[in-house]
Image (tube, coloured by chain):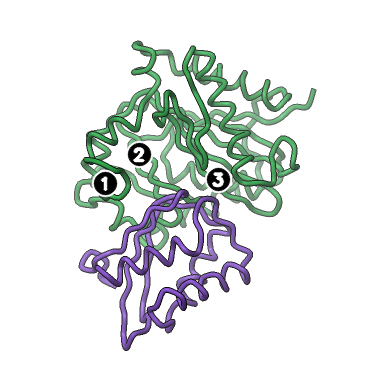
Amino acid sequence: MKEWRFIDFGLVDIRDMMAMDEAILKGDEGNTFFFWTPKKSIILGFFQKAEVELDLPKCKDYTITRRISGGGIAFSDDRCRQINYGVVGTIDNDLFPLDIIESYKQVCGVLIDTLVHYGLNAAFRPINDVTVDNKKVSGNAQTRREGKLLQNGTLLLDFDIEEMLRISNIPKEKFLDKKIASVREGLTWLDRELGEQRDMEEVRNVMKEKFEERFHVKLKTGTLSNNEKELAESLLPKYYSTEWVYR
Amino acid sequence: MELLKTKPGIHKSRGGLIRSFVFIENGKIKDITISGDFFLFPEEAVFKILENLKGTPAKREDLLRNIEDTYAKENIQSPGTEPSDFTESIMKALEA
């Protein structure tokens, strides 16, 4: 059975993580699956403007950066009960389909299989969401470069909706009815669905197993190569810069 | 552009929200910025879309044709979002 690299970056500064994320995509170490746990932070999607999407004076104690893929803000609070993952894969029209939505569906399948393992009614909602009973439980973002894709995403174990609404400027157009009511109705998380807290390591291990099953590979724990470390180092200034984050 | 003082045009496509901030001079687009949670590949091509819109008459058909041209030239893919969605967002900004 083929072996793919697996890395758990643990608790990280999101700017460092985004530099490593880009380095893995641009590096040449083959298909990789990885986890990280972000410290209190906000990641803007490529097309989002900080001053438009966020109530910046209220975000002072958050680390803010931007990622290279589109989509919406990824918000991590002090509770840290989110599983963040990344996948870098060579687009082969089999395991990683050329069609963008199909490829989202394939990678999101890992999250769906994990949620189904816990007895939940999980489904893929195009373009990039995973839902439980039609409520979003996971957001995902993909970019592509030179025949490879990078998909990042998060599985919510717990989530502070009030805090997200406090710091962001979500227009009424995003939801049909009143802001707070519809966000509440539209989002959910594992702890709420199960009525109890699961150990995060346990959930991550289920995800790893489901990843191996879905991709027919064995995940082998590894680290960044020297080349990737140098690449990440050279990308760091971007993720820390005002020009990139507040452009 | 002073974004927070400009009224945005807001339109939601199947692929995400598009907020447009548009500055018009003599019936043409002088400056334009967008913010949104949509997806578009390759990502950098969004700057080409915006650059090419400058100087375009602020009319729906002209805007749409201009954006479609950039899509074709830059090989843009944007799942759930069409050139007509960007056009709609800009038109809403003009009406705002």
At horizontal 29% and vertical 57% (from top left) the residue drawn is A52
Question: Pointer 1 and pointer 2: residues touching (CB < 8 Å)?
Answer: yes
Q: Position of residue A167 (x, y in %)?
A: 24, 44
| Residue A142 numbered tag | 3
Chain B: drawing colour: purple
User: Marks 1/3: CA distance?
Assistant: 22 Å
In-image side of A2 versus A123 (left or right):
right
The dot on residue A139 is none
- Total marks shown come to 3
The residue where tag 1 is placed is A168
Q: Residue at x 55, y 43 (%)?
A: A21
Q: Nearer the viewer, residue A32 or A221?
A: A32
Tag 2 residue? A75
Camera-side residue of B43 and A97: A97
| Whether label 1 touches label 3, CB < 8 Å | no
Q: Chain of mark 1?
A: A
Q: Which chain is green?
A: A
Q: Are marks 2 and 3 in contact (CB under 8 Å)?
A: no
